[in-house]
Image (cartoon, rainbow, N blue to C red):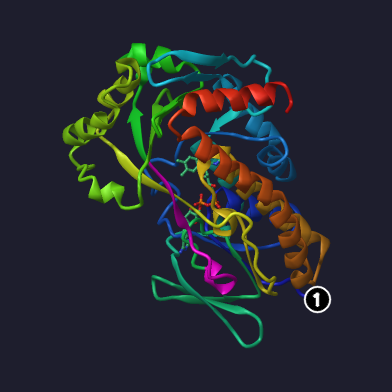
Amino acid sequence: MPSPRTAIVGGGLGGLTLARVLAVHGIEAVLYEADAAPDARPSQGGTLDLHPESGQRALKEAGLTDRFLDAVRPEGQDMKLFDKHGTLLREDTAGADDMDRPEIDRGTLRDILMDSVAPETIRWGKRLTEAAPLPDGRHELRFADGTAETCDLLVGADGAWSRVRPLLTDARPAHSGVNFVELRITDADRTHPAIAELVGRGSLYALGDDKGIMPQRNGDGMIRTYVALRTPEDWLTASGIPFDRPDEARAALLSYFADWSPRLTDLIRHCDDTLLPRPITQLPVGLRWESRPGVTLIGDAAHLMSPFAGAGANLAMLDGAELALTIARHPGDPAAAIAAYEEAMHAYVLPEAETASRHLALMISPDGGRRFLALLEQFDTGR
Ligand SMILES: Cc1cc2nc3c(=O)[nH]c(=O)nc-3n(C[C@H](O)[C@H](O)[C@H](O)COP(=O)(O)OP(=O)(O)OC[C@H]3O[C@@H](n4cnc5c(N)ncnc54)[C@H](O)[C@@H]3O)c2cc1C
C-alpha cells in the first residue's frame, strides 16, 4: 500500500520529535508551523529538565542522545526552597555527572530537533484555521494564508489552543486558578550578582500565601522568574497592572509581596522591562476521546496541564516518538496505529496530569513552602 500522506500541524517539541522519529523510520511527513520562520519568536522559553522515561527516551528514539548530552547542564538540577521570609527550607546540589534529569534550554533543544529534520519537511508561515473531514476519510487543512492541503493522516501538535482538537473532543482548556507573570534578568551575574548568587546554578522556589516567586537560571546567563498568584482568570486584566509600562507594572506586582523578604522580591524589583502575563490553563485530567481513523493529537493539544509536574514538554516529545514508532509498526494501517498510540498515551499521561494538578494545589497554597518541603521529604523516603 502507498504510505499515507501525513500532516503534522505545529512545530513545537512534540511535532518536531514526531517528524524526526518518522524520518528515522523512513516515513515522510509534512509539518505546518504558524510561525513565519525558525527565529520568528524572540524567546523559545525557559529551561527544561528532561526525564529519562519520556523526554530522554524520545531523544534516544530520535537518535539524538549524543547531541543532547553535549548541550545539557547537569548543575541546572540544583534546587533551593524558601519560605516567604527568605528562610532556606531545603537545598539540593547536583553532581557534575548527575544525569537523572539534566536541564537544557528549550531553544537549544528545539534547534537540535529542527536541525535533525530535512528543511523541506517544515512549511513555515502556515497557520491552520480549520481542519475539515472529507467523505473519503481524509482531511482538508485550511490555512490563514488562503491555501488548502489534503492529508490521509492528520496529527494535531498545535498546542493549548489546537485547531485540530475539535475534530475529536469538545473539551477546551480551562483556567487553573493560577496566573503567572514571567520576568527576566539578563546577564544576571554581571548586572545583579547578589540575585545571581541567591538563585545559584539551578532553580529556586519561594512559596507561601497562595503565591510563588520561582526563578531559574537559563544557559545564557539569564534568570527567568515565574511569579505565581492564585487569582481568577480575569485578574491579568482586572488587576489593572499595566504590563506594557514596566515601572508601574513592577510596582504593582511588588504590592502583592509587600511582606515578603526583599531578597526574594529583588527578583521583581530589578527585572528587565519585559513582564509577560501568562494565565495557566489546563485540559480536564483524564481527558479521553473515541479514536477516529485519520486524525490524532500529541502534546498540549492532547493533554495540556499546568507546569507544576514539569512534564508537558517531556510528554509532548514522548507522544511524538510513541506515535511515530506505532505508525512504523502498523505499515498501511494508520487507523490501528492511532488506536494503539492513543491507548498507550492516555495511560501514561493520566498519572502526570494528576501530579500536575496535585502539585499546583499544594505549592500555590497558604503554606506552600512547608507543604512542598514535606512532599520532597516523602520522595526522599520513597513514600
Ligand atoms: C510557564 C511554563 C513553564 C513550563 N515548564 C515546563 C517544564 O519545566 N518542563 C516541561 O516538561 N514542560 C513545561 N511546560 C509545558 C511545556 O511548555 C508544554 O507542555 C510543551 O511546550 C508542549 O509542546 P507541544 O509541542 O505540544 O506544544 P507547543 O510547544 O505549544 O508547540 C505548538 C506549536 O504549534 C504551533 N501552532 C499553534 N497553533 C497553530 C496553528 N493553528 N497552525 C499551525 N501551527 C500552530 C505553535 O506556533 C508552536 O510552534 C511549561 C509550560 C509553561 C506555560
Name the residue at 57% across, 45% down.
312
Of residues 264 and 184, the one nearer the viewer is 264
The residues colored magenta run 164-179
Can you give x and y, in whole percent of width and height, for residue 225 in the image? 39, 30
Q: Which residue lies furthest to the front in this view?
A: 366
Name the residue at 54% across, 49% down.
305
The mark tally for this picture is 1
Callout 1: CB less than 8 Å from ligand 1: no
Can you give x and y, in whole percent of width and height, for residue 64 in the image? 68, 39
Q: Does the stretch in magenta take in 263?
A: no
Of residues 282 and 73, the one nearer the viewer is 282
Amino acid type for the residue under numbered disc 1: Met
Query: The residue tagged with tag 1: helix, strand or loop?
Result: loop
Kindly tell me whether residue 116 is visible in this rendering.
Answer: no
Q: In this view, does 64 lie to the left or right of 73?
A: right
Q: In this view, does 89 lie to the left or right of 342?
A: left
Relative height, residue 344 to residue 201 (above, below):
below
Name the residue at 79% across, 69% down.
336
Q: Residue furthest bottom?
A: 135
Q: Is residue 34 left or right of residue 243?
A: right
Quadrant location, the C terminus = top right
Of residues 318 and 243, the one nearer the viewer is 243
Quadrant location, the N terminus = bottom right
Relative height, residue 30 to residue 303 (above, below):
below
Kindly tell me whether residue 364 is visible in this rendering.
Answer: yes
Rate crowding at label 1 as few (under 14), some (14 to 19) or many (20 or more) other CA atoms within 10 Å.
Answer: few
Name the residue at 61% across, 41% down.
355
Find residue 191 and report its image quarter: top left
Q: Mark 1 points at which residue?
A: 1
Can you give x and y, in whole percent of width and height, for residue 101 in the image? 65, 29
Relative height, residue 145 to residue 75 (above, below):
below
